[in-house]
Image (cartoon, rainbow, N blue to C red):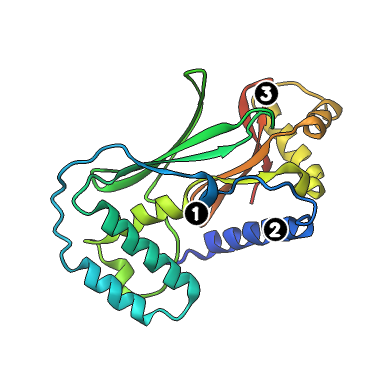
């Protein structure tokens, strides 16, 4: 059921988050500032129209839940939920966020487009990156999940679309990191990356791939389910695909 903890997924998410925080904090003094999600994303209404919304009691229930929250992260989510509801009430649940980063090189800024929208009974998060009108990468997840609190409020099927839609906007967008903060993961990245390239039938020796990583001056990118992200990825220009740099 939605918003019920899955122990295996939760542990993986915690391990990945802890690892990322550890390395980011270790290199914090030397790290170049790159735009993070909150600084680089903008919201655009793709469609605005009349929406038959019967959630007349939803706002009061949100306020009631907010008054019961004691944890700061819980309060933060409730404020985000209320803001989303106010912004999209009587509108189509369909929005786009743009995350700026350096995918190939730090010489030119790239933009990842994340569209979050309602499709029948599902909330869809669709990532895409295009260059010169050519789609180079896309990824889709359904009904994004983030654990907030064990409370019947989050199990209400009538309101669950708002929780999922809010989760998509605030927690499912890509995370951007600078590669220089993760040199300690290089050995892991070599093993994981070479295995993936081999599975794709692409022959490359260890030294060549290691040199590619050493010379790479773009960003590392994380995407996927908020609780259990797909991993950290590096763009591999020879094949024009993302390759795993780290997997939880």
**Where's the N terminus, which quadrant?**
bottom left
At mark 3, the secondary structure is: loop
- Residue 142 x %, y %: 38, 46
Kind of element beneath mark 1 = loop
Residue at the disc numbered 1 = 226
Q: Is residue 80 left or right of residue 224?
A: left
CA gap between label 3 and label 1 equals 27 Å
Q: Earlier in the sequence, mark 1 or mark 2?
A: 2
Residue 1 appears in the rendering: no
Measured Cα–Cα span from mark 3 to mark 2: 26 Å
Count of marks overlaid on the render: 3
Q: Is residue 198 above or below residue 122?
A: above
Q: Quadrant of residue 208?
A: top right
**Residue 28 x/y as whole percent:** 75, 56
31, 123: nearer the viewer = 31
Q: Which mark is residue 19?
A: 2
């Amino acid at each position: 059921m939605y918003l019920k903890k899955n122990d295996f997924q939760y542990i993986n998410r915690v391990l990945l988050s802890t690892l990322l925080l550890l390395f980011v904090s270790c290199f914090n003094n030397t790290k170049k500032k790159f735009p993070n999600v909150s600084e680089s994303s903008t919201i655009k209404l793709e469609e605005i129209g009349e929406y038959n919304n019967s959630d007349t009691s939803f706002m009061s229930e949100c306020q009631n839940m907010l008054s019961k929250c004691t944890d700061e992260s819980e309060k933060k989510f409730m404020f985000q939920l209320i803001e989303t509801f106010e912004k999209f009430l009587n509108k189509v649940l369909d929005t786009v966020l743009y995350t700026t980063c350096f995918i190939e090189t730090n010489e030119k800024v790239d933009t990842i487009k994340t569209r979050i929208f309602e499709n029948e009974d599902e909330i869809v998060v669709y990532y895409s990156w295009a260059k010169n009108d050519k789609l180079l990468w896309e990824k889709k997840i359904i009904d994004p999940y983030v654990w907030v609190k064990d409370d019947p409020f989050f199990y209400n099927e009538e309101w669950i679309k708002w929780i999922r839609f809010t989760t998509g906007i605030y927690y499912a967008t890509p995370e951007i990191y600078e590669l220089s903060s993760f040199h300690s993961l290089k050995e892991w990245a070599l093993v994981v990356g070479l295995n993936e390239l081999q599975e794709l039938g692409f022959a490359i020796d260890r030294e060549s791939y290691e040199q590619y990583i050493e010379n790479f001056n773009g960003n590392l990118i994380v995407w996927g389910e908020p609780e259990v992200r797909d991993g950290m990825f590096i763009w591999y220009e020879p094949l024009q695909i993302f390759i795993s740099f780290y997997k939880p």
